[in-house]
Image (spheres, rainbow, N blue to C red):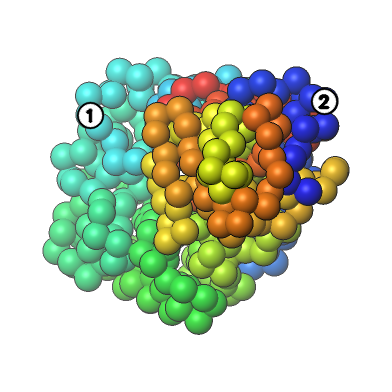
Amino acid sequence: MLAANALADRLGVTTPVLLVIEERVRANIARMAAKAAAAGVRLRPHAKTHQSLTVARWCREAGVDSLTVSSLGMAAAFAADGWNDITVAVPFSPREAGAVRELAGRMRLGLLADHPAVAAAAADCGARVWLKIDVGYGRAGVRWDDAPALTALALAVPSPGPAGILTHAGQSYAARGRAEVLAVHAAQSARMAAAHDTVAAALGRPVFVSIGDTPTCRTADAFPGIDELRPGNFVYYDRMQFAAGICGESELAAFVLCPVVGVHDGGRRLVLHAGAVHLSKERDGAGYGCLVEWDDPAPGRLRPDLPLVSLSQELAVVADGDGGTCLRPGDAVLVAPVHSCLAADLLPGGVTSTGRRLASAGLR
Ligand code: PLP
């Protein structure tokens, strides 16, 4: 049913919160950990999705012993919670050299570089240097087929040399369906193999190969030539992944639980207290998310027929074509966010459906 009033009452929810389904998160983590183990590769999940000490501990309980993060602040927060092998997977900014020196002195800290001077500066701070490769996304990284630039980058890292090569095939988000995702995976594998051979030739030794995006890591079963997977979104998934056929409805594990604050036009226009500051302005073809039924004790069906069609800073408008929801102001509803990483960032912490508060790493 649509109203999740008993749940909101039980959790004491009066304003928008991130609702996390612990059972589903643990199942998502276990599935990815089993896949990595079967393929003989390390799983270094990206914690930027949840930014939660609690969810990272669930990863640890599934056998994970290393993390990826997207800031030094996050690295410090997770290090304080006992993680001592962390890669900061955004290009290193030499402006952060001081903080890097401090952290690298007490843990295995990996940094990314795609410029020889940056690679040398990162190594000088005591970090392990990952060479960032662009396998077609066109964001950061040296192109896989630019052998002169890759060679210069590899040779810029003083002894013992780079920790490995690393990519994020973000183009997998444009793929639709299994076959298209597998085609992206095949291309990234071939391109990383080519980059590997160039770097290995320059160094006179093989290097570690790291990939990481949820669509390819979730869809592929074989990872030849790959040593490490760094997916992040897979702990929660979201409407974007579901719409692209990456995950099933029962794997969706993070929602926004929020109040209905208005019912208009005979129930055809519902207003929720959930806006851009809670969900982000990420949208897909249908809107900024959609309502989800709550079948205690678990989420039920997604309702793409009840999309969030407009979003202001604090509020969302849900279009209900026939006004049949019978919701009233004061009811609580669940929203499936388009992109869970952004909703989790905007609603730090969160709560499980059994009332457990998630400890936030608290830093971007
Ligand atoms: N590694 C890097 C460098 C990334 O930028 C990201 C996401 O942006 C990931 C890993 C995780 O990918 P996903 O969000 O698809 O799980």
Name the residue: 29% across, 41% down. 91
In primary-sequence order, the first of circles 2 and 1 is 2
Disc 2 secondary structure class: helix
Query: Within 10 Å of the Cα at label 1, are there few (<14), some (14-19), or many (20+) other Cα atoms?
Result: some
Name the residue: 85% across, 43% down. 297
Disc 1 secondary structure class: helix
Relative to 344, does residue 205 appear above or below in the rendering? below
Give the alpha-carbon distance from disc 2 to disc 1, as whole Å: 48 Å
Residue 155 horizontal side relative to residue 51, left or right: left
Residue 22 horizontal side relative to residue 67, left or right: right
Name the residue: 23% across, 63% down. 143
Where is residue 259 shown, x and y percent of the image?
Answer: 63, 30
Relative to 309, does residue 123 appear above or below in the rendering? above
Q: State whether residue 83 appears in this view.
A: no
Residue on which the image places disc 1: 94
Relative to 8, does residue 4 appear above or below in the rendering? below
Which is nearer the eye, 109 or 5?
5
Q: Which mark is in front, 2 or 1? A: 2
Where is residue 79 shown, x and y percent of the image?
Answer: 55, 25
Residue on which the image places disc 2: 10
Name the residue: 24% across, 60% down. 138
Where is residue 293 shown, x and y percent of the image?
Answer: 73, 49
Which is nearer the eye, 192 or 155?
192
User: For the residue with label 2, is its CB less than 8 Å from the closest atom of ligand 1?
Assistant: no
Identity, as a three-letter code, of the amino acid under mark 1: Pro
On residue 19, which mark appears? none
Query: Within 10 Å of the Cα at label 2, are there few (<14), some (14-19), or many (20+) other Cα atoms?
Result: few
